């Protein structure tokens, strides 16, 4: 299938709470006579779709999945896809976007490359989901519970949602007979763990691969290959990603200027920081802060009305 791409195909996911990088919501599509195809698009986030009522089809460039109530499908990072909506009854479905890097804590280092899509084609897991109805039902129930908790936000809901989400990942591994998810070699993880700790401590400085490899007593060329093999991403790309995550945290929790924050995450040039931030988040740092404050204010207002 030939697919035409435009500059607008990459979807930017806006999180209500940028410190909890998951978005889950329901969409209602009224019944209609004619079929409707959504636009081809993609995003960094891994996506789950669960149909509550009605029928729809999710298409990738290589597969299509016909879904009805109770069905679940997942789409890997940067997987080009679109929705085909049809039927004589209303369609109600749930969408869950997850920034996988935010949920890969140090204890899950060996799965980092696989679950972020760096070393695994996650969409292939749908073949296992189709063949496992009881596990599919379990994931469907977990997604519903996550949606409930993120909607009503009981005290400690982040812990409950995190637990449900990790349970979904565990369920997928249990039914992954094709071994799509392959953990990192434990020996590589053992070598990389102290290096990742060093990177976190040096994000404010130059944080060059030569310095980190020297601290680990490795040759730079060997360490670069080891890092790429284990993490599924180059050293420089990983450092940039971590700097953007740190900058995001500082923007929302500190009263510093953008120039100060750019220095706090290792940039000597604010212009370079602006350019990279726009590439990651689709807006300027100031626009990002204003949007988050607006969304937070709207959420607070909605809560006061509910009271």
Image (cartoon, helix red, strand yellow):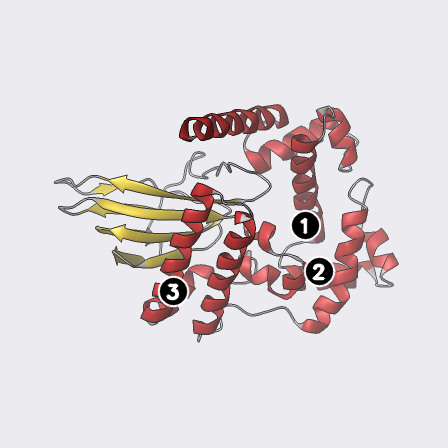
Q: Position of residue 221 (x, y in %)?
A: 78, 60
Percent across and percent down for residue 35 are: 18, 43
User: Element under label 1?
Assistant: helix
Relative height, residue 188 to residue 262 (above, below) = below
Q: Which mark is residue 138?
A: 3
User: Where is residue 143, by image quadrant?
Assistant: bottom left
User: Which residue appears at 43% of the width and 30% of the height?
Assistant: 307
The picture places residue 211, in percent across and down from the top left corner, at 85, 52
Determine the residue located farthest toward the front in the rendered image.
Answer: 307
- In percent of the image, x 78 and y 58: which residue is there? 195
Label whose residue precedes the other's in the sequence (1 or 3): 3
The answer to the question of whether label 1 and label 3 lie on touching residues, with beta carbons closer than 8 A, is no
Give the spatial CA distance, label 3 vs label 2.
35 Å
Q: Please tell me which of labels 2 and 1 falls first in the chain.
A: 2
Decide which of 223, 177 is in the foreground and name it.
Answer: 177
In what element is the residue under mark 2? helix
What is the CA distance from the residue labelled 2 to the residue labelled 1?
10 Å
**In x, y percent, where is residue 269?**
76, 29
Q: Residue, x 55% and y 70% (percent of image)?
A: 182
Residue wearing tag 1 = 238
Which of the two discs, 1 and 3, sits closer to the camera? 3
Question: What element does badge 3 sit on?
Answer: helix
Label 3 or label 2, whichever lies nearer to me, is 3
Q: Which residue is mark 2?
A: 227
Q: Residue at x 20, y 39 (%)?
A: 30
Q: Visible in this render: residue 81?
A: no
The alpha-carbon separation of the residues under discs 1 and 3 comes to: 34 Å
In the displayed structure image, the side of residue 153 where residue 200 appears, left or right: right
- The answer to whether the residues at label 2 and label 1 have Cβ atoms under 8 Å apart is yes
Q: Quadrant of residue 26?
A: top left
Q: Quadrant of residue 25 in the image?
A: top left
């Amino acid at each position: 299938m030939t697919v035409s791409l435009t500059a607008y195909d990459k979807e930017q996911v806006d999180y209500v709470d940028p410190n909890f990088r998951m978005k889950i919501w329901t969409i209602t599509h009224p019944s209609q006579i004619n079929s409707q195809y959504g636009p081809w698009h993609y995003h960094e986030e891994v996506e789950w779709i669960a149909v509550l009522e009605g029928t729809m089809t999710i298409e990738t460039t290589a597969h299509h999945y016909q879904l009805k109530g109770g069905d679940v499908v997942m789409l890997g990072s940067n997987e080009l896809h679109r929705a085909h909506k049809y039927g004589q009854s209303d369609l109600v479905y749930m969408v869950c976007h997850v920034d996988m890097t935010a949920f890969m804590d140090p204890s899950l280092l060996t799965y980092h490359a696989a679950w972020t899509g760096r070393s695994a084609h996650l969409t292939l897991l749908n073949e296992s989901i189709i063949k496992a109805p009881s596990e599919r039902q379990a994931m469907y129930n977990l997604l519903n519970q996550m949606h409930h908790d993120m909607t009503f936000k009981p005290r400690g809901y982040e812990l409950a949602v995190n637990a449900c989400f990790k349970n979904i990942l565990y369920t997928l591994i249990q039914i992954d007979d094709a071994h799509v998810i392959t953990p990192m070699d434990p020996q590589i993880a053992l070598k990389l763990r102290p290096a990742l700790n060093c990177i976190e401590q040096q994000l404010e400085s130059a944080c060059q691969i030569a310095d980190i490899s020297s601290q680990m007593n490795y040759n730079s060329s060997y360490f670069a290959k080891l890092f790429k093999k284990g993490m599924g991403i180059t050293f420089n790309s990983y450092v940039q990603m971590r700097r953007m995550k740190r900058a995001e945290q500082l923007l929302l929790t500190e009263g510093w200027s953008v120039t100060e924050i750019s220095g706090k995450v290792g940039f000597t040039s604010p212009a370079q920081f602006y350019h990279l931030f726009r590439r990651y988040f689709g807006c300027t740092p100031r626009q990002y802060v204003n949007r988050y404050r607006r969304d937070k204010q709207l959420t607070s207002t909605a809560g006061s009305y509910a009271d």
